[in-house]
Image (tube, rainbow, N blue to C red):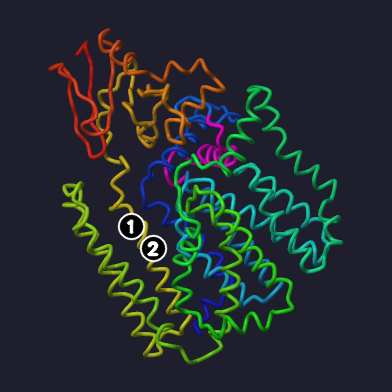
Amino acid sequence: MQQWLRSSKFLLIFLPIWLFVLSWIRPLSVPDEGRYGDISRTMFESGDWLTPRIDGLPFMHKPPLLHWLSSMFMELFGVHVWVLRLVPVLAGTLMLVGLFLFVKKHISESVAQLTVIILATNLLFFGSSQYINHDLLLASWITISVLCFVDFTIYARKSILFLGYIAGAAAFLSKGLIGILIPGMILLPWLIYTKQWKKISSLLNPLAILLFLFIVSPWLYLVQSKYPQFLHYFFIDQQFNRFSSKEFNNKQPWCFYLMILFVSFLPWLFASRFTSIKTIFKDYKSCSLLALLVWWFVSVTVFFSIPPSKLAGYILPAVPPLAIFFALVMNKVLESSNKTRLQTWGIPVFTVLVGIGVSATPHFIRAHQPFFQNQAIFIYLIGALLIVLPLVLVGLYKKQKLNYLTYIFISLIVLCSAVPFAVRILDTKNNVGQTDFAEYIAPSTKIVFYNYYFYDVPFLLQLKQPVYIVNQWDTVHSDSASLEIKDGLLFEPQLKKYLWSEQQLQDALMQKQDLLVISQPHNFATKDPSVKTLHYRNYDVFIFHPSK
């Protein structure tokens, strides 16, 4: 066995650096990365660390920890996309290190090494570590909280208990009540099932609870003092109603998360063996940690499967127990010298199919064909890499030049590493390189988004003032990008001046105001021959400069 893969120091240094380097590759994705990136930029530039804002309006959907951290990093390194991605990369690193230390302490170092390898190359985890939103930050703090509480139940170290409450507070400040509900939902039934209910009272330490409240209360108190309707909006509208309502977007079938987890762990399912899985359940039948892993996975998956609205990142808290479980399975697999055809060929065939899919993409995307004319060669190179390299690796493995774990590890590192390069080329929704119209923006220019909010454009233009958004605001009620902006008026109604009606736009045009209107292609038109019109991939730009 290649010794470098059995070096904990190597894994804990290489994997975070690998995640960090790859986070530089992609531009901001729309809408999430554009939304949260610009909220953080606004917080940093305004110095208002209390109120997250989108287009100048309060954005109270989520707590501010993501934006606090991003703003801190921008203070240190400036306003760059890679700086924003430091948060998900560090959140991923936190989960990796936390799981490693826990598994090493309670199972073995070899299983801990396998755990971080499996976690880092899990497709959902990897993608989330490269993506700016709240999901991985929440999942990492939840994981640390659960691991600390479990460790406390075994060794009764008060410092670990307090660390667990600090992690719980950070989870709350990442995404609200879900950050404390999930750890409780995992731990309490597990303690009861394993007949450890007497330890529940020691977990509910009054000083630890006070520490939790000391961390989370200041922000809640200050925002509520400023906006009397905040607590109702935050807890009822955005927490309880979002879980129970059928009116939110992203409706998916009940089995959505099972499919997501299945695909994300599919390479490791190929590498596993059914007999090894049976052996784990047999060997650890009386082990409370196995019961924890099973209940952790089941409870989180069932919980998030109940609401009709589902997004892939929500299920991230279910990934850590599966990573530990597959590490136990792989530890058994590696003890056997015989590998089935599925174990040998499953991962390379999967990777080759992904490579074929990437290579075929330009032939199926016709709407943006001009964009791909200059990029097709790079798409084909990525596809060729994903087709050829796995076959080379399997050949080296069969010739015994690589051991099985090294073969799998390199294969999945290659697969994951190809993703941001492919997305950089195939993601046509971002607007990088589409902002040279900035030269027409004068200090007096009012920028107008017509019937659509272009999330990454304010960040790319480094705008210092809100844009004016034209929409039928009186009809905006359902869950949408428009509603999340309109909701800001609940807190600062005076900012309605930035939310225009169609008539307000026409009035501004009649008054010959200095305007720059951005609309989706063919969604806005003018008969004024003096208007300069620019056409880009995702929008048209109309420049009204009466003085020029």
The range drawn in magenta is 59-83
Establish if 411 lies above or below 258: below
Count of marks, rendered view: 2
| Predominant secondary structure, magenta span | helix
Q: Can I make out residue 487 in this image?
A: yes
Q: Nearer the viewer, residue 240 or 537?
A: 240
**Residue at the image position 38 percent from the left and 42 percent from the top:** 30
Name the kind of residue labelled 1 in the image: Phe
Q: Please, what secondary structure does the residue beneath circle 1 have?
A: helix
Residue denoted by label 2: 417
- Whether residue 49 sits left or right of residue 74 in the image: it is right
Q: Nearer the viewer, residue 295 or 395?
A: 295
**Residue at the image position 64 percent from the left and 60 percent from the top:** 299
Crowding near pointer 2: few (<14 within 10 Å), some, many (20+)?
A: some
Q: Position of residue 304 (x, y in %)?
A: 57, 53
Residue 61 is covered by the magenta coloring: yes
> What label sits on residue 45 in the rendered view?
none
Q: Position of residue 528 (x, y in %)?
A: 15, 16
Residue denoted by label 1: 421
Q: Position of residue 517 (x, y in %)?
A: 28, 23
**Residue at the image position 54 percent from the left and 64 percent from the top:** 13
Q: Are marks 1 and 2 in contact (CB under 8 Å)?
A: yes
